[in-house]
Image: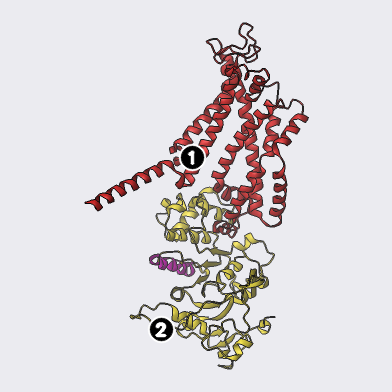
Amino acid sequence: MTRTTGSGPVLSADQLSIIFDGKDAAGHAVEVRACNKVSLDLHAGEIVALVGESGSGKTTLARAFARIFAPDEGEIRFHGERITGRPKRSFYRHVQLVYQDPFASLNSLKTIRHILGRTIRIHKPELTRSEVTAQILQLLEMVALTPAEDYIDRFPSSLSGGQRQRISIARALAVEPDVILADEPTSMLDVSIRLDVLNLLDAIRRERGVTILYITHDIASARYVSDRMCVMYSGELVESGPTEEVVSNPRHPYTQLLLASAPDPSRTKPAEPGDTPDVDEPADPSQAISGCRFNPRCPAVMDRCTAEKPPLFTVGEQQVKCWLYDGVEAPTRARSTDEEHRP
Amino acid sequence: MDRLLRNPKVVIGLAILAFFVLVAIFGPWLISALGLNPRAVDDGAIATPPSADHWLGTNNTGQDLFAQLVVGARGSVVVGALAGTIATVMAVAVGTTSGYLGGTADRTINAIVNVLMTLPGFALLFIIAGYVQNAGYILIALVIGLLGWPGGARSIRAQTLSLRNRDFTSALRTTGESTWRIILVEVIPHLGGVISAMFLSALVGGIFAESSLAFLGLGDTSGITWGTMIAQAQSSGAILRGQWWYFLPPGLCIAIIGFATALINFGLDEITNPKLNSSLAARTRRFNADLARANGRKVTA
């Protein structure tokens, strides 16, 4: 494993924006900021959960990390080095993306041997045929598809969703990566097998020291598996911190809303109206909102929120993008947030 | 593959095609083994109907038509197969490249394809064949093939565009797979059905085009193909005199090959689209009828 034992992040986004051409409700061309000045560091061996509702830009962020989208603003750095313009193949040797839909992400006409074997061969062309086969079998065992000999010559169509997702995780592992970007790896799976996949990700982190970005809209699974949690809303990172801190003591009104709207098994009677905060439609990323993007839905909205965009405030171990925390616990402004104001 | 060979339409179509391919390969040897010569003139039998001596009769110069039919298969089948192969390979190469690469490459290729599609293919073929005096059938096949691909390239491009946007191609890109390997190894197998249907219609198109050119006297007039046989029958007035044995067999052979490819295409359609499966539809109808009868009895009882 080629790991530089430095204290810096393995993979980081620095003020990253991804802009798409879109149309607003009236049909005028606007730029859609799927990610807006997001800064996120992934450190060696940690699992970072990225949570947020649909359309919050979490998948876009993962795909920017995987270099499917090129940054429109800002930078992505790998071990501190800018990756723009660097060859992609050597980058994928270290960073791998696991896709959300295991039914779509494997070529249905190819055997498991081909799917995993090609990935191994691309990055280790010096291996012989039998060495590649040995590695495929080893990968299948690692993702608990045993006996591996039974699976190697099967087609994806003869596997269940959970088994296919294991194959895509095995494909990501085939290059012995430093970072795995897991884009909602459990959302297409039956509830009963989600835990297996989460435990598999945790085992990969523990045994191989792989850094994992776990993207999900399911706060419970994020809490189960992650060390650090980042919450995205409408293309922006609104809160981040140690998972337990964020879950037990959410600071941002959006995080509070997200946690309150997750079903709680310990609650026995149905929720009364008013028990859960008003769950409004998420902000359309193409919509221009002045100030904080959450202000139309925020229960604690102030005049300042519609006028000025909040910077990241540090509250305890958490970082929160909300004016409520201005002046609380000696706010330290996060780096280069002076440009936050939208033109 | 199993489903392919269980479909009766595909099996019958393939059997017919295989028969003609065998005739095309071994026909000329078979004819000389039988002691026949398609160019030999039998002075005693001019324009005679089928008989024990001449199984399919003779033409106006007394040449044996059975020998001509068998020998002519090679020319027609070679032209069809070669033209079909060229057209299909071009269509797949251009269509997948254009659809997969997208962007400027796609726009440029698409513009060229659109221009080529507006060219009247047969008229151009007519001019080229007339310009090249006594074109051999290989040249004819080349011209037919090179004019036949733009339509196919467009449908291949459309299919490739949708495959390009599927997660599995994106996943291959993020493992670092090269563009050309993704197109050749991963994407093209998904187009198998479209490609085989395209090849079959291009094959028949090639045979038709060759026959049409020969009929108009623009093909390889010295060679023997089904097209030249029909052309000679027409020019010697066989149709007016009711000498059916002269023009019917080659015409029928062309029609049967067309029929066989149509059968295979229908069969492939049934396999890829279960709604078109006639035996399945019949079974569903029977099941529904039984169900209705059972329900009716229950209501009356």
> Would you name the residue on which mark 1 appears?
B267
User: Which residue: 52% across, 53% down?
Assistant: A107
The x, y position of residue A213, in whole percent, is 53, 71
Q: Point out the stretch of residues depicted in magenta.
A: A191-207
Outermost residue to the left: B301
Q: Main secondary structure of the magenta part?
A: helix
For mark 2, does the 10 Å Cα neighbourhood hold few (<14), some (14 to 19), or many (20 or more) residues?
Answer: few
Determine whether the residue tagged by mark 1 lies in a helix, strand or loop.
Answer: helix
Nearest to the observer: residue A120 or residue A317: A317
User: Which residue: 56% across, 41% down?
Assistant: B197
**Chain under callout 2:** A
User: Which residue: 38% across, 66% down?
Assistant: A192
Nearest to the observer: residue B291 or residue A144: B291
Mark pair 2, 1: CA separation: 59 Å
Can residue B288 be spotted in the picture? yes
For mark 1, does the 10 Å Cα neighbourhood hold few (<14), some (14 to 19), or many (20 or more) residues?
Answer: many
Q: Is residue A206 magenta?
A: yes
Q: Colour of chain B?
A: red
Q: Mark 1: which amino acid?
A: Gly
* Residue B112 relative to residue A162: left or right: right
Q: Quadrant of the C terminus of chain A?
A: bottom right
Write down which chain is painted yellow.
A
Nearest to the observer: residue B233 or residue B150: B233
Q: Quadrant of the N terminus of chain A?
A: bottom right
The vertical placement of B93 against B36, above or below, is below
Determine whether the residue tagged by mark 2 lies in a helix, strand or loop.
Answer: loop
* Residue B46 relative to residue B285: left or right: right
The x, y position of residue A300, in whole percent, is 52, 89
Can residue A7 be spotted in the picture? no
What label sits on residue A273 in the rendered view? 2
**Chain under callout 1:** B
User: Which residue: 59% across, 15% down?
Assistant: B32
